[in-house]
Amino acid sequence: MNINPKIILKFTSISIVLILFVALILFLFSCDFSNEEIEEVKVYTYSPEASLDLYIKGNNYLRQGKYKEAENTFEKLVIIDPKFSKAWESYSESLLLQNELDKSLEYIDKAISINSSIASHLSKKSLVLYYMEDYDASETFSDRALQIDQNDVRALIVLGAVKTQKGLYDQSMEIFDLAIEIEPEDSSIYYWRGKNYVNMFDFETGMFELNKAIEMDRSQAAYYIERGQLFRILGNIEESKNDLLEAIEIAKTPRKQHLIDIAKELLLEIENE
């Protein structure tokens, strides 16, 4: 059977046009779908019950060490309830625990802008500023928090830590003693008081305080790092290594990469000595 070449050519041309047309339609559809994904806006509906539920859920995540989940939960909460200052404080906490200091400061500032009469907002900011090494500003906000609530233990701890940084060890000790009177089961007070003794070159008492902090709470990598450094000062290298390795393991869950990095750097220094 003879087939006219012109017919084949015509058929081929039509097929190519159809293929190109289908490809164009698919491309345009794909672009529209992508744009829909990119332009998707997070929309949540406010109700007092939804706000309270998210607040409780977010703080449960914080207690469980699930900091990213807490962050995501508080992000939803401040969208539906942007005037809830305690939500912004907890949002700040979730970022602080991930060592995202700039964002943490931004969100605690938001909480303070909504309500500056809540002591915990001010003491939280003092803590963030302490970790940012702005000790004068940190002291100012600790003082402001204590003017509102003289029993704000976090404000006392940060103020004591600032006094230690400034070499005012006697003042620091008085502040930590007061904090322990208010909250004797708070292991972090013994940790910070131990650091104060180490700075005073009272290594024996410093070790006692750090041991007590660890006995009270073995889930804090920072405690092991501090004790590991003290063991190193005392020449007990094996114990120092053991504490730093323990800190790395603890900091993996929940992951605190900055503490892992600190412990690894100290281990490397020991190996190179």
Image: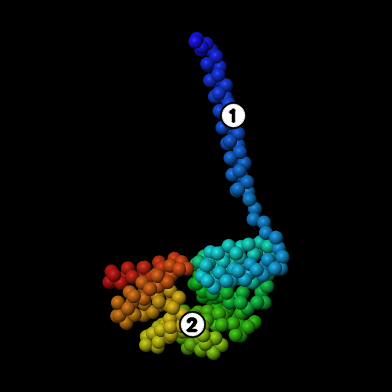
Q: Given the image, on which type of amino acid does mark 1 rest?
A: Phe
Q: Up-down: is 149 above or below 245?
A: below
Q: Nearer the viewer, residue 40 or 136?
A: 40
Residue at 40 percent of width and 87 percent of height: 208
Q: Which residue is mark 1?
A: 21
Rendering quarter of residue 260: bottom left
Query: Which residue sits furthest right?
Result: 47
Q: Earlier in the sequence, mark 2 or mark 1?
A: 1
Residue at 29% x, 80% y is 235
Q: Taking 53 as reference, is 17 above or below it?
A: above
Q: Position of residue 27 (x, y in %)?
A: 57, 36
Residue closer to the observer: 254 or 12: 12
Residue 113 location, x and y as percent? 66, 69
How far is disc 2 from disc 1 in space, using C-alphas? Answer: 70 Å
Q: Element at badge 1?
A: helix
Mark 1 Cα-neighbour bin, 10 Å: few <14, some 14–19, many ≥20? few
Task: Identify the residue at the far front of this view.
Answer: 1
Q: Nearer the viewer, mark 2 or mark 1?
A: 1
Residue underneath mark 2 = 187
Foreground: 118 or 242?
242
Which quarter of the figure has residue 152?
bottom right
Q: Is residue 232 visible?
A: no
- For the residue labelled by badge 2, is the local secondary structure a helix, a strand or a loop? helix
Name the amino acid, label 2: Ser
The furthest residue to the top: 2
Image x and y of residue 148, in percent: 64, 82
* Left or right placement of residue 109 versus residue 221 in this view: right
**Between residues 6 and 125, which one lies in front from this camera angle?**
6
Looking at the image, can residue 249 be seen?
yes
